[in-house]
Image (cartoon, grey):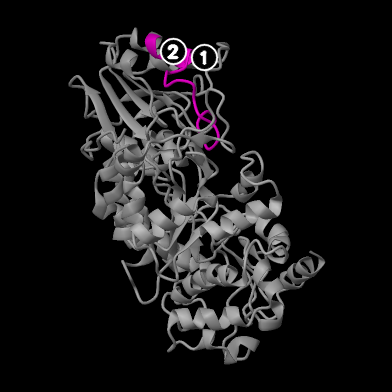
Amino acid sequence: MAALLSLSALALLGAGASAQTFTGTAQGGFPDCVNGPLSNNTVCDKSADPVARAKALVAAFTVAEKLNLTGNNSPGVPRLGLPVYQWWQEALHGVASSPGVTFNATGQFDSATSFPQPILMGAAFDDALIQSVAEVVSTEARAFNNYGRAGLDFWTPNINPYRDPRWGRGQETPGEDPYHLSSYVHSLIMGLQGGEDPEIRKITATCKHFAGYDIESWNGNLRYQNDVQIPQRDLVEYYLPSFRSCARDSNVGAFMCTYSALNGVPTCADPWLLNDVLREHWGWTNEEQWVTSDCDSIQNIFLPHNFSDTRQGAAAAALNAGTDLDCGTYYQHHLPLAYSQGLINQTTVDQALVRLYTSLVRTGYFDGPNAMYRNLTWSDVGTTHAQQLALQAAEEGIVLLKNDGLLPLSISNGTKIALIGSWANATTQMQGNYYGVPTYLHSPLYAAQQTGAQVFYAQGPGGQGDPTTDHWLPVWTAAEKADIIIYIGGVDISVEAEGMDREDINWTGAQLDIIGELAMYGKPMVLAQMGDQLDNTPIVNNANISALIWGGYPGQDGGVALFNIITGKTAPAGRLPV
């Protein structure tokens, strides 16, 4: 252990990294293939086969170095000039804050385009749109990478079927239908990776969470120890098709296994799932394709799953089953003992590392400053095209659920609008989870003010259903002054998120109370339900509410998108994906 920690400490000093310095970032730059220790290694020979290049690099490592490179926070190998590298980046709907992504406080690389959450983009049922969005995301990711602010591996998409509308992570998925998910994810991966089998992969996408992962913290279930029981037919027909599309049809670079067990076996230690199904049955056998654990799920194999009697046994079970990378430290801490006890062999360790480093070779990581995509800069982030696409993606996904002849609204300078609700002045709420720093955030209030109308704003109760009414008085004042009432509310990530499933899909009592009283004013009333799925029966059945739209998590230009739909600048064409 001491030797491994020593290697990590040396690596954090950046010894042997390329000459370019990346101050305050999570990445260590690029290997120096001209003057560095690796310059004479085949890994730096661009004419060589990618697998041969990776094998030459791995052959240069000592056993201790190999074992120390199996975690997401890779310390590199200072004596060889192999820089530190963070494998964990997120980009669910835009380059996102994560261990490997660093946003600058101000100036260049202080933001990235924030698209709608996948649940809203899935409602567009427009695969060409999804590929265009992914192309922008991967371009911005590459620009961040070129300046040491991101790696080349992004742990997206979440392609689990959205089976239960109470699931807090349903917002991360395109919907519930396996066919729709399969089509969506193919287009997404084409845009992220730069095609099905490009010579230089743009970035490496990661299909997660494999498999059978959905609602996790409900009715006594705990996300880190769930053992989901799924019959084989349900697996084949419902839970696996989107992942099959990733592997067989889209040639995705990586997969992520889950926290949970599937039919008694933790997925990260399941050779049937990771080898028999994924690699052999689906033919996902290219050397640059690898599996990462979900973060700290290797530890879960030991406790609380109790699948192995020892920590080193849990780490060995995962590696032998085909989990090549540990998001966490369990491999780095416990594989040395597993190796000394003969629970793993060097061939298996080498296989995992060859997969990982062949992937980096395929992205041009070892190809120097003239490699493809290395010309992308800050000027390629948040472009006019990206901003227009973010707005288009939000508009295409918004769903019209009810319209009794009110929409589109005709708004002029003399129109008086009451804009009410916890989402009425939403900013970061519009992004949902797994978000980064957006180029800007245009709230509904901002968009309403751009119409020239006189806007009376009041917040009202939030998604948590705050029952106190003393701050509701501005709601009634706004409603009394207005010609038109627009209520924008619902749920947000304060009540639905990763590890936070809901008990039901009801509106909060406080919101229904205010909505009902607003409807009694008898004025034209539009309601926009935001966030994920709710039972809108009380809204639909209220004759005094003339229009209802679903806006999901619409991203950086969500407010403008909503008002473009409400005023008829854009026709509502989205369809509920759940």
Mark 1 against mark 2, which lies toward the viewer? Answer: 2
- Position of 359 relative to 400 (above/below): below
Between 416 and 574, which is closer to the camera in this rendering?
574
Identity of the amino acid at label 2? Ile
Which residue corresponds to mark 2? 514
Q: Which residue ends up furthest to the right in the rendered image?
A: 2
Image position, residue 493 (x, y; %): 51, 33
Image position, residue 562 (x, y; %): 33, 35
Question: Is label 2 in a helix, a strand or a loop?
Answer: helix
| Residue at 45% from the left image edge and 16% from the top image edge | 511
Contact flag, marks 1 and 2 (Cβ < 8 Å)? yes
Q: Is residue 225 left or right of residue 231?
A: right
Crowding at dot 2, Cα within 10 Å, few <14 / some 14-19 / many 20+, comes out as many
Q: Which residue ends up furthest to the front in the rendered image?
A: 342
Q: Is residue 175 visible?
A: no
Magenta highlight: main SS:
loop
Where does the magenta region start and end? Answer: 494-516
Q: Is residue 346 left or right of residue 358?
A: right
To which quarter of the image does residue 132 belong? bottom left
Identity of the amino acid at label 1? Trp
| Residue at 74% from the left image edge and 68% from the top image edge | 8
Say whether disc 1 or disc 2 marks the residue closer to the N-terminus. Answer: 1
Image position, residue 224 (x, y; %): 59, 38
Image position, residue 477 (x, y; %): 45, 14
Q: Is residue 63 visible?
A: yes
Which residue corresponds to mark 1? 472
Placement of the N terminus among the 4 image quadrants = bottom right
Q: Is residue 95 magenta?
A: no
- Position of 67 relative to 484 (above/below): below
Question: Is label 1 in a helix, a strand or a loop?
Answer: loop
CA gap, disc 1 and disc 2: 9 Å
